[in-house]
């Protein structure tokens, strides 16, 4: 009996020692980063950890995940400190302690600029982001009934995990837009959400002075009611993908549905992500008779009711 107890104790000690050894980090493991891809299985993650020399045994990692009922691992990039054992790594991955970045998307950014900012911040790949932002099947799944997500992603400061799935980023930014604008049967003067966001994007790109947003909106609304072309310079820039520098005569002749110098009505989609103030201005324009405005070269605009007044303002401020 005594001998059996001794054998049992020896076996227990050996098993404990083996478990301690297998759980311990390989010698000399430095601080490093480890990425978990979307859809990777527990066994695949375990094998990648083993290949990266962060754990001693992939089988032990898998067994521990079942024994501790910790099988859901959040995709993303993780910082693993040197000396962290297998159980510690498992806990970190199942808690979802991914490396995150704070990023600010300014008002007036278009999809291409947002994509560039996200890629520069190590949030997601720009090309993949713009691909999903134009995938109508995916967009319908999250509630965007449009050709692209242009204008539907709210400009704000966000905290995203590094190496995020672009679909998650788009969904978060769209939910933020919906929370700001709210659910309404109609948006503004009998307009759809898509039309209001499109109008708001024009206001966003034209306005430089906060107090002028409602006046600029009134000009566009008035011109739409009269069947006039909007003659909005930022739509031309969007049409020819020319976001800096002067607009040329050739640009104005561009045969694009976004060129409001040639096409009547609103462009087919928003041209940027409008902020809250521009959205409100699009929904609630100032009641005016203005049909024209011209830049005064100090950020503000001169508004006019007639073409004669407008031409005089152009001569005064643009010549």
Image: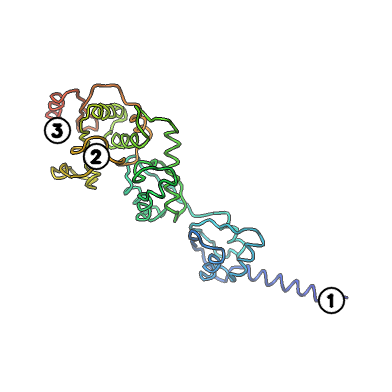
Q: Are marks 2 and 1 in contact (CB under 8 Å)?
A: no
- Work out how far the residue at label 2 is from the one at label 1, CA to CA, in angstroms: 87 Å
Disc ID at residue 4 = 1
Label 3 crowd (10 A; few <14 / some 14-19 / many >=20): few
Left or right, 245 with reference to 190: left
Find residue 54 and report its horizontal and vertical position in percent. Answer: 54, 67
Residue 183 occupies which quadrant of the picture?
top left
Q: Is residue 232 depicted above or below 29 in this figure?
A: above
Find residue 41 and report its horizontal and vertical position in percent. Answer: 54, 63
Q: Tell me the element at label 3.
A: helix
Left or right, 123 with reference to 2: left
Is 61 in front, or is 22? 61
Left or right, 248 with reference to 272: left
Residue shown at the point (27%, 28%) measured from the top left: 221
Residue named by callout 3: 318
- Work out how far the residue at label 3 is from the one at label 1, CA to CA, in angstroms: 101 Å
Left or right, 198 with reference to 138: left
- Work out how far the residue at label 3 is from the one at label 2, CA to CA, in angstroms: 17 Å
Find residue 135 and report its horizontal and vertical position in percent. Answer: 37, 51
Which is nearer the N-term, disc 3 or disc 1?
1
Residue 67 occupies which quadrant of the picture?
bottom right
Farthest right residue? 1
Residue 149 occupies which quadrant of the picture?
top left
Label 1 crowd (10 A; few <14 / some 14-19 / many >=20): few
Residue shown at the point (42%, 44%) measured from the top left: 173
Q: Tell me the element at label 2.
A: helix
Disc ID at residue 234 = 2
Farthest bottom residue? 3
């Amino acid at each position: 009996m005594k001998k059996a107890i001794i054998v049992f104790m020896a076996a227990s000690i050996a098993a404990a020692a083996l478990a301690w050894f297998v759980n311990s980090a390989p010698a000399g493991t430095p601080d490093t980063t480890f990425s978990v891809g979307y859809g990777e299985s527990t066994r695949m993650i375990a094998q990648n950890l083993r290949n990266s020399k962060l754990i001693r045994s992939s089988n032990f990692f898998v067994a521990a995940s079942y024994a501790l009922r910790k099988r859901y691992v959040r995709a993303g990039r993780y910082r693993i400190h040197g000396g962290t054992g297998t159980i510690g790594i498992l806990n970190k991955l199942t808690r979802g302690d991914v490396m995150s970045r704070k990023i600010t998307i300014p008002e007036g950014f278009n999809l291409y600029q947002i994509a560039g900012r996200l890629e520069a911040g190590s949030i997601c790949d720009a090309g993949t982001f713009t691909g999903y932002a134009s995938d109508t099947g995916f967009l319908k799944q999250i509630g965007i009934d449009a050709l692209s997500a242009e204008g539907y992603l709210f400009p704000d400061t966000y905290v995203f995990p590094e190496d995020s799935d672009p679909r998650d980023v788009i969904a978060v930014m769209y939910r933020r837009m919906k929370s700001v604008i709210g659910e309404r049967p109609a948006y503004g003067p009998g307009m759809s959400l898509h039309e209001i966001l499109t109008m708001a994007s024009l206001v966003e790109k034209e306005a430089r002075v906060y107090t002028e947003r409602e006046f600029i909106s009134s000009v566009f609304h008035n011109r739409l009611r009269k069947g006039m072309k909007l003659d909005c310079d930022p739509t031309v820039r969007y049409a020819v993908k020319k976001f800096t520098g002067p607009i040329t005569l050739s640009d104005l002749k561009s045969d694009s549905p976004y060129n409001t110098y040639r096409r009547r009505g609103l462009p087919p989609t928003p041209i940027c992500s409008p902020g809250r103030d521009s959205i409100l201005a699009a929904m609630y324009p100032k009641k005016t008779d203005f049909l024209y405005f011209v830049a005064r070269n100090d950020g503000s605009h001169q508004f006019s009711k007639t073409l004669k007044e407008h031409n005089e303002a152009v001569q005064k401020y643009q010549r």
